[in-house]
Amino acid sequence: MGSSIYDFVKNTLLDNFLKLARVNVMTGEYDFMKYDVVMREEGYENISSIYHYIERQVSDGIILSEYVGEYLKFANPEYVQGRVFSGDRRIVQSYKRKVHDGYMWVTFGIVVPEDCDRENPNVVFYWREADSDTITMVDALSTLSAIYSKILKINLTTDSFQVIKVSEYERARFTNRLSRITDWWREFAETGHVHEEDLEAYREFTDAGRLRKVFQEDSVSTQSCRYRRLIGDSYRWAQMELMSSIEYEDDNQVLILYIKDIHDEHLREMRNRQALLDGYHRDALTRLFNRHKYNEDLKELSKNGEGHLACMYADVNGLHELNNHLGHEKGDDMLCSVADALKRFFPEETVYRIGGDEFVMLSTKLSKESVEHIVVEVRRELLQDNYEISVGVEDGSCELGAYKIVVAAELAMRKDKERYYRENGRDRRRRVLNEELEKTLEAKKYAERFLDVISDKYAGVYFVDLKKDTIQHIYIPEYFLRLLEDADYSYSKAMRLYIDRYVKEEYQPGLLRMIDYEELTRILRTEAQGDLSLIYQKVDGKYVSLRILEMGQYTEEKYETIWIFSERVFQTNDPIQLYSGRKLSYEETVNS
């Protein structure tokens, strides 16, 4: 072994190390110059190769699992020889290992003498207790490694790089073959590792000349770029960040490069941004584009001044009368019906609601004749709901001005509206509204009459969804409404309060069985065949007949039932039995 390095280690540094070995990196032969008792491993005496020695440490579990990957690289002769003969003078790896009943931070390294080559392949492997600064640095890098998928130390002045963290794929594909960071960036882009839509931005960002200038102007700046990089068979969003190292000087531009996966975060951000944009550009009622979007698009069309533009300008007839006669809810229904029809008949065009009852459609593809033909179909469909619109259509070259085309369409719509009201529109609309109003009032009258009739005959009639534990009431007494409020509108919780307060104790277990929805579902689906009847007694002495029926199909999301409660008067002194698993006969459930 070269005397210069050996003498230096022996005379100067020996006391600072726990373990030192002279190693032939070609053959793996080694000889310990120092072997502190703290580091001694039993049963390692006959291991002839340093590479097998390191493998044995890992297989025996001496090295903590999170540090095994990096440490095990030094059990690979080709890896060690590559590092040693490349001229790398500082080969260091810190890790945590077991020592007796505890753990110790250890720094492992290789000292390479200046005269080391393949003819004289002797180096020194050393192990020493890591100092506090090293431990802090390793901890910091471990934390960063959990966040970043790649960490490099790059030098723009020498066009070089040093790997701190990189995937095994990139190590084999790039770092083991290339020595210049600019070659890595170029080849990474050229071999399909960057999405084609992001190539221009990636190449601009990694332009070394631009980066040198940027950091010379502001050495403490942080530069970042988002792009999609190939991971496996798919592209994922990543962010590359560059910041100056503490070693940075204008004539030695050392930077730290970080890359982290931001795919999920970026998609979430894009969805939120789109939701905000939709909120700004969409009409809340109809979900058509609103006047903000209309103004932006019209401005863009006018600015470009090229191509063809067709405009349909529509106004809903009778919205004011409808709001006054039947309320704004009916007016909203009308507007939504018009919007739905326009979206359906103009699926590829841009449709806007620009005012209370005004709609605009802009198209760079359709002709005036095509739009007029479609409008006929829109009007025919809306008439089925007794809705009518006034429409104006115009087209022309954008060179003449997009605003002029829209104004012409609006004027045509005004003339159509005048014609509509001049002929019979207003009288017809008022007649239709009066007919609808009469139907609504009649339906309300019948509903009120129905509730008046059943209120004397029934103690409660409810639709109950057993899957959602929700209730829709047809008739509900005032006291049960208060129970629902106390139970946060959970039907089962409200029934539990009802049973506890109003039902005789001997009938409570059987009735509680009915709000065990799994048990009730089983009974309805098997024994009762969808129609269950039972009788129980309240604390005031009155008997109540409860009938539970299936109302719809049983699905994973929904199981609708109807619960009908009615008070009964029995003329027999015999006690009435609660439903016990069989459907009661007619004679058992009606008055004696």
Image (cartoon, grey):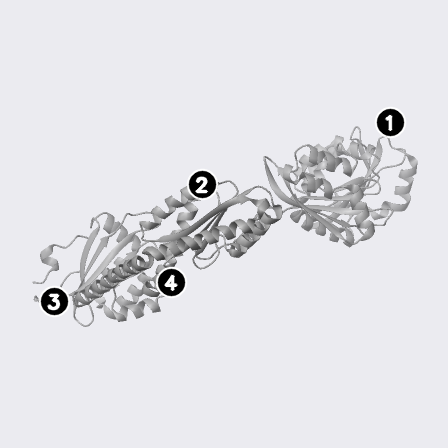
Q: Which residue is mark 4?
A: 320
Residue type, label 1: Glu
Residue furthest top in the image: 119
Residue 82 left/right relative to 461: right
Tell me where residue 416 appears, x and y as whole percent: 40, 52
Residue type, label 2: Glu
User: In this picture, is 466 found above or below 52?
Assistant: below
Q: Nearer the viewer, residue 172 or 11?
A: 172
Mark toward the viewer: 1 or 2: 2
Residue furthest bottom in the image: 540
Mark 4 crowd level (few <14, some 14–19, many ≥20, 10 Å Cα): some
Q: Which residue is mark 3?
A: 569
Q: Which residue is mark 1?
A: 119
User: In this picture, is 54 found above or below 502?
Assistant: above
Residue 36 left/right relative to 570: right
Q: Which mark is residue 369?
A: 2
Find numbered disc 2 in the image and state the secondary structure of the residue it sits on: helix
Q: Nearer the viewer, residue 347 or 574?
A: 347
Q: Which mark is residue 158?
A: none
Total labels drawn: 4
Precedes in sequence: disc 4 or disc 2: 4
State the CA–CA distance, disc 4 to disc 2: 31 Å
State the CA–CA distance, disc 3 to disc 1: 113 Å
Residue at 10% in and 65% down: 574
State the CA–CA distance, disc 2 to disc 3: 75 Å
Find numbered disc 1 in the image and state the secondary structure of the residue it sits on: loop
Q: Nearer the viewer, residue 347 or 7?
A: 347
Precedes in sequence: disc 2 or disc 3: 2
Residue type, label 3: Val
Tell me where residue 53 appears, x and y as whole percent: 73, 35
Mark toward the viewer: 2 or 3: 2
